[in-house]
Image: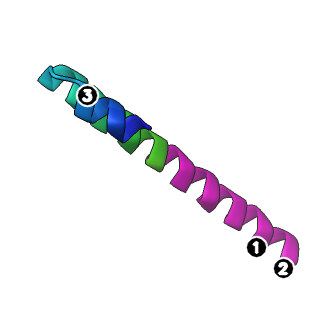
Amino acid sequence: MIITLMLKGKEPGDELRGLITVFAFLASAWYCVVQYRKEQGESQS
């Protein structure tokens, strides 16, 4: 959905904003996975 918005955006600023949004989403999701694995590892040991 975000990618389609990026393609529709005619201004370079909108495209850049879309890339930043995607990067921020991936970074936050990766961080959540890392924290979750840390908690799981601590509870197992």
Residue 20: tell me if it is visible. no
Whole-angstrom CA distance, mark 3 to mark 2, is 50 Å
Q: Which label belongs to residue 14?
A: none
Q: Nearer the viewer, residue 1 or 41?
A: 1
Q: Is 38 a magenta residue?
A: yes
Callout 1 amino acid: Gly
Q: How many callouts does the rendering have? A: 3
Residue at image coords 24%, 35%: 7
Q: Which label belongs to residue 8?
A: 3
Residue at image coords 25%, 28%: 8
Marks 3 and 2 close (CB-CB < 8 Å): no
Residue 41: tell me if it is visible. yes
Residue topped by disc 2: 45
Callout 2 amino acid: Ser
- Write the start and end of the magenta stretch as one range: 27-45
Q: Is residue 19 above or below residue 31?
A: above
**Does residue 13 appear left or right of residue 22 in this picture?**
left
Residue 5, position as x, y percentages in the image: 34, 30
Indicate which label's residue lies in the foreground, 1 or 3: 3
Whole-angstrom CA distance, mark 2 to mark 1, is 6 Å
Q: Residues within 10 Å of mark 3 (few under 14, many from 20)?
A: few
Q: Is 37 a magenta residue?
A: yes
For the C terminus, give its image quadrant. bottom right
Marks 2 and 1 close (CB-CB < 8 Å): yes
Q: Which label belongs to residue 41?
A: 1
Q: Nearer the viewer, residue 44 or 9?
A: 9
Q: Which of marks 3 and 1 precedes in the sequence?
A: 3
Residue at image coords 16%, 22%: 10
Q: Residues within 10 Å of mark 2 (few under 14, many from 20)?
A: few
Picture quadrant of residue 4: top left
Marks 1 and 3 close (CB-CB < 8 Å): no
Element marked by disc 2: loop
